[in-house]
């Protein structure tokens, strides 16, 4: 069940500029912005502009673009934050650990012994 339809969805509001966000990349299909709850400095989300609930709701073009942009973001984060590792996460459905029901992929810079424990659902 989509609990965050357009009009209510926080990421739709962010895409529309109705709530502030630190946007790092934007094109016709996707937008990338800093996660409000940085698990490590440089934690970025790559989201579709269109309200698509999860991976299964993406078009093939959106799916391809998300990965292309995650790749660009990973390079930028690597340059800016000099992590020794990167973790990409993408959760689908409540039971998959998703909390915002508008498609997004996490790009998380990682460092040795950074104490970050990523699990699904994240706690
Ligand atoms: P999920 O658990 O669905 O994979 O991740 C949702 C992510 O969205 C969380 O990491 C959370 O910090 C982030 N988030 C939730 N609300 C906002 C918001 O209003 N702005 C931004 N930039 N990130 C948000
Ligand atoms: Zn949405």
Image (cartoon, rainbow, N blue to C red):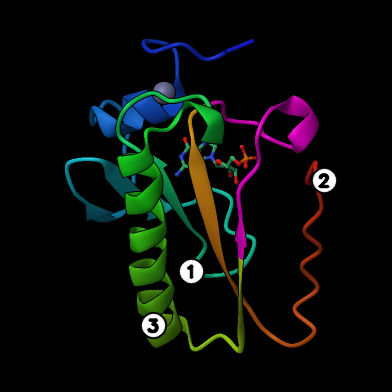
Query: Which element is circle 1 on?
Result: loop
Read off the magenta span.
Answer: 88-101
**Distance CA(mark 1)–CA(mark 3):** 8 Å
Residue at 30% x, 46% y is 31
- Using residue 38 as the reference point, say whether residue 123 is left or right of it: right
Residue 92 magenta-highlighted = yes
Residue 114 % position (x, y)? 75, 78
Residue 51 magenta-highlighted = no
Query: Which element is circle 3 on?
Result: helix
Pick whichever of labels 2 and 1 is earlier in the sequence.
1
Residue 99 % position (x, y)? 65, 31
Residue 80's disc is 3
Residue 112's disc is none
Are the residues tagged 1 and 3 within 8 Å (C-beta)?
A: yes
For label 3, being within 8 Å of ligand 1 is answered no
Residue 13 % position (x, y)? 33, 24
Q: Quadrant of residue 7?
A: top left
Residue 60 % position (x, y)? 37, 40
Using a 10 Å C-alpha cutoff, classify the residue at mark 3 as few (fewer than 14 neighbours), some (14 to 19) or many (20 or more). few
Instruction: Please name the residue that numbered disc 2 is placed on.
Output: 123
Are the residues tagged 2 and 1 within 8 Å (C-beta)?
A: no
Pick whichever of labels 1 and 3 is earlier in the sequence.
1
Which residue ends up furthest to the left in the rendered image?
28
Instruction: Please name the residue that numbered disc 1 is placed on.
Output: 42
Residue at 41% x, 62% y is 70
- Using residue 7 as the reference point, say whether residue 16 is left or right of it: left
């Amino acid at each position: 069940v989509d609990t965050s339809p357009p009009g209510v969805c926080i990421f739709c509001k962010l895409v529309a500029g109705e709530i502030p966000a630190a946007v790092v990349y934007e094109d016709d299909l996707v937008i990338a912005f800093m996660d409000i709850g940085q698990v490590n400095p440089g934690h970025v989300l790559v989201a579709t502009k269109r309200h698509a609930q999860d991976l299964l709701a993406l078009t093939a073009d959106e799916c391809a673009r998300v990965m292309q942009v995650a790749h660009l973001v990973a390079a930028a984060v690597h340059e800016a934050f000099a992590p020794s590792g990167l973790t990409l996460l993408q959760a689908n459905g409540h039971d998959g650990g998703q909390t915002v029901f508008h498609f997004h992929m996490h790009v998380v810079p990682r460092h040795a012994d950074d104490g970050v424990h990523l699990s699904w659902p994240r706690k």
